[in-house]
Image (cartoon, grey):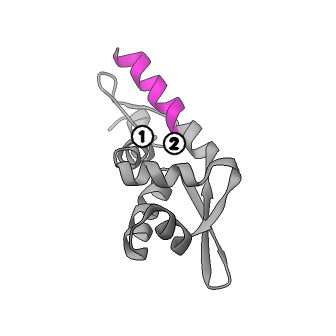
Amino acid sequence: MSDSAADTSPGTPVTDGTDWHLAPQTQDFLKALGSPTRQRMMMLFSAGAELSVGEVAERVGVSQATASQQLTLLRRGGIVRSRRDGKTVLYRADPEGALTALSDLRSYLTNCC
């Protein structure tokens, strides 16, 4: 594996000289966008909102377990970030993570298409 193929930092498409790949976090970003439930969840975080799992579950109409699983995928994709406040985990949008993934995607599409 070449040095450039080993660089999988966010925002860096991976290439072995002949084949471009999206960085793993960008792949997770695209997976996170693939669910209508996660898309609805993402909209809850507009205007800087910070919500707990329970609040997200209630507003989207899913169980807390489902909300937690879906928020984990959104966090892995760089779309939301979390912080702990006592026993409560709060989630909010991560615009920098989303912009990094979009930059990686743009570079990939520029090189492949």
Q: Residue 64: which quarter of the image?
A: bottom left
Image height of 11 relative to 19, above or below: below
Q: Residue at x 37, y 69 (%)?
A: 66
Residue ID for mark 1: 23
* Disc marking residue 58: none
Left or right: 43 as drawn, with respect to 24 = right
C-alpha separation, residue under disc 2 versus residue under disc 1: 6 Å
Image height of 94 relative to 83, above or below: above
Q: Residue 88: which quarter of the image?
A: bottom right
Residue ID for mark 2: 10
Of 101 and 53, the residue lying toward us: 53
Query: Quarter of the image containing the N terminus?
Result: top left
Find out whether residue 106 is within the magenta segment: yes
Extent of the magenta region: 101-112
Mark positioned earlier in the residue sequence (2 or 1): 2
| SS type, badge 1 | loop
Q: Are marks 2 and 1 in contact (CB under 8 Å)?
A: yes
Left or right: 16 as drawn, with respect to 39 = left
Left or right: 78 as drawn, with respect to 47 = left
Q: Position of residue 108 (x, y in %)?
A: 41, 25
Of 81 and 103, the residue lying toward us: 81
Find out whether residue 103 is within the magenta segment: yes
Q: Position of residue 95 (x, y in %)?
A: 63, 44
What type is the residue that disc 1 sits on?
Ala
